[in-house]
Amino acid sequence: MIELLTWVEKHRPRRLEEIAGNPGAIKTIMSWLDKWEGGRPEKRAILLYGPAGVGKTSCAYAIARELNSDIIELNASDFRTKDVINRVVGNATKSGGLYKEKKGKVIVLDEVDGIHGRAEYGGLAALIKLIKVSPYPIVLIANDPWKISAEFRKLTLMVEFRRITERTIVHVLKEIAKKEGIKTDEKALRIIAANSGGDMRASINDMQAVAQGKSKFGVEDVAYLKMRDSQVKIFDVLARILKTESIDRAREALRDSEEDPDTVLKWLVENVPMEYKNSEDLSRAMNFLSRADVFMGRIRKRQDWALVKYAMDLMSAGVAKAKKSRYKGFTRYSYPKVFVMLAKTKKSRQKTREMALRLQGREGYSNKIHASLKVITDEFIPLAERIMKSTEMAARLASELEFDLKDIELFVKSKDRAKEIYQLSLRITHDRLRKQMKGDRSKQISLFEFG
């Protein structure tokens, strides 16, 4: 049975001391929390920054538990305007907790590096004001804090999170596998860890994907991970686009990938329906992908690569913003069926291309048809294949186009029938030439025949 809950969520650390890696960052956070216990620290907001999958979000949740507080959680798409900030977060700071046993609230704002530029200045200004007056701790999360204004950063306690060591990742993977009742090979875990580039979340997701439906796994089950792109794997690209609501994050995911846009488009077309469960979200996302495909078609036809930026925006930012809210469940992405189909038909397509090249006179063969490869492939070859079903018609076509035995064998599977057609075509050619010669006897064929 496929598990809907991700292991990342299922095994997320509940306390700060349970978070693996970045001990210096954890120590700084704990010191900041102690100041809240005794009153209010000088800086009411803490900015956790660093690459994806290193524990920033887990720390934010753990902070709320340490303070026994409710969590008010928003992301970049929620706080682009002043009105939203004032209505959602402003009211939260003034009202009581959801549960009587809770002492207060912790405001968690994710993807804050996604609010920059004049279009979002109102939301940023409202956030700055909120930080200055908030009676509750504010936890900000960002990948790249240097996109945020200096004025904003000065109001926060900045805490850097670095990539997790492979040794730490392997230790965590062992613990999770043990809890899930999965037998593992340590070498396999090391491969997963090495492949993640210090991303704990990616490692856990990879292990869940590998272990799905199994009671144990080994090196052979993770061998494919070694072949995946070391910079940004296509599954990571999909997750970064489909799991975010930030336009900037989605664009960055596509820009960082070494896959060409056409390939990413095919992966998105295959996997968006698996991720977007709401029919309206799915409809909007597929509309953006359809428009991106139109641009890619124009690029192929006109070789106008200036259009690629529009296609990339539609398939990244457009798809990311098509959903009303993020989907948090585990989604196992699938290899595009179009690639499977192309792999299955590879030999057939190679054979068709070989036919077209021979008929056009390429590859050292004499020219038989004066037409483009596309016309030969799309029009002549399908017609010729139908004609070749009749032995007599096949022989006449072979004679007219001067096919040799190898040419005929491209169209006819049976070698015996191909030989039969070839022999018949030779007789037809011989008879035609003999008739032509007889007909020419009555005509002047040489200057020496003049009297």
Image (cartoon, rainbow, N blue to C red):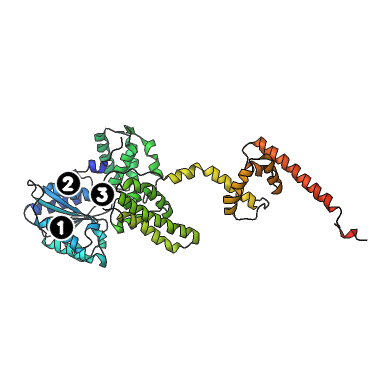
Q: Would you say 399 lies left or right of 78 here?
A: right
Q: Mark 1, mark 2: which one is toward the viewer?
A: 1
Q: In which quadrant of the rendered image does the C terminus lie?
A: bottom right
Q: How crowded is mark 3: few (under 14 residues within 10 Å), some or many (20 or more)?
A: many
What x and y, as percent, mark residue 248?
30, 59
Disc marking residue 33 = none
- Residue marked by disc 3: 54
- x%, y% of residue 196? 33, 46
Tell me how far mark 1 sits from mark 2, CA to CA. Answer: 25 Å
**Residue found at x 25% / y 57%:** 77
Which one is nearer the viewer's eye here, 375 or 162?
375
Q: Residues within 10 Å of mark 1 (few under 14, many from 20)?
A: many
* Whether residue 398 is situated above or below residue 110 in the rendered picture: above
- Identify the element where label 3 is drawn: loop
**Mark 2: which amino acid?**
Leu
- Position of residue 230 measured from the top left corner of the image (x, y, whole percent): 38, 49
Identify the residue at the far right of this view. Answer: 451
- Ranked by sequence position, the earlier of labels 2 and 3 is 2
**Secondary structure under badge 1?**
helix
Residue picked out by circle 2: 16
**For the view shown, which residue lies furthest in the bottom direction?**
118
Q: Marks 2 and 3, Cα distance to the nearest angstrom?
A: 13 Å
* Placement of the N terminus among the 4 image quadrants: top left
Looking at numbered disc 3 in the image, what kind of residue is underneath it? Val
Label 3 vs 1, first from the N-terminus: 3
